Amino acid sequence: MSGNGIGPSPGLLTSLRRLIATTLEIAQVRLELLAVELEQEKLRIFGGLAWAALAVLLLGVGLTLAVGLLLMLFWDGYRLPALAVLCALFLGAGAHVARRARALLINTTGGAVPLSLDELARDRDALVGRE
């Protein structure tokens, strides 16, 4: 009765197991890629926020010095040029850091996980092409 051709052949089960193993391996690789991209996105955002915080700090110091400069305009001596230089230095540094933070926070890659989306699109195209 076992030779009547009823039931799956050992070759079919082996092929099915290989297909499932390959599918799981592809899914694992895609999830690992997604995790790496999310980590990179997190680091990019954190770096941009750190630069933005530094910009706020420097601009605050610059504003404080600008107010001090305005108060000292009426006093005599060399305190005025020194304070003017410090004020310009802090305001310029704050503006530079703010531009850098903005550049870091602008996402030019087209999304948070572009490589994962590209890989999934290639997988879909490969599957459609096999039919």
Image (cartoon, rainbow, N blue to C red):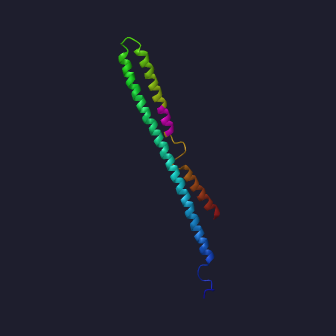
The residue depicted at 48 percent of the width and 36 percent of the height is 101
**Horizontal arrangement in the rendering, residue 101 relative to residue 18 (left or right):** left
The residue depicted at 61 percent of the width and 58 percent of the height is 125
The residue depicted at 57 percent of the width and 66 percent of the height is 21
Q: Is residue 23 above or below residue 98?
A: below
Residue 30 falls in which quadrant of the image?
Answer: bottom right
The residue depicted at 47 percent of the width and 26 percent of the height is 92
Residue 17 falls in which quadrant of the image?
Answer: bottom right
Residue range corresponding to the magenta coloring: 97-104
Q: Is residue 110 above or below residue 4?
A: above
Residue 101 magenta-highlighted: yes
> Outermost residue, bottom direction?
1
**Horizontal arrangement in the rendering, residue 12 relative to residue 44 (left or right):** right
Secondary structure character of the magenta stretch overall: helix
Q: Is residue 89 above or below residue 18?
A: above
Where the N terminus falls, by quadrant? bottom right
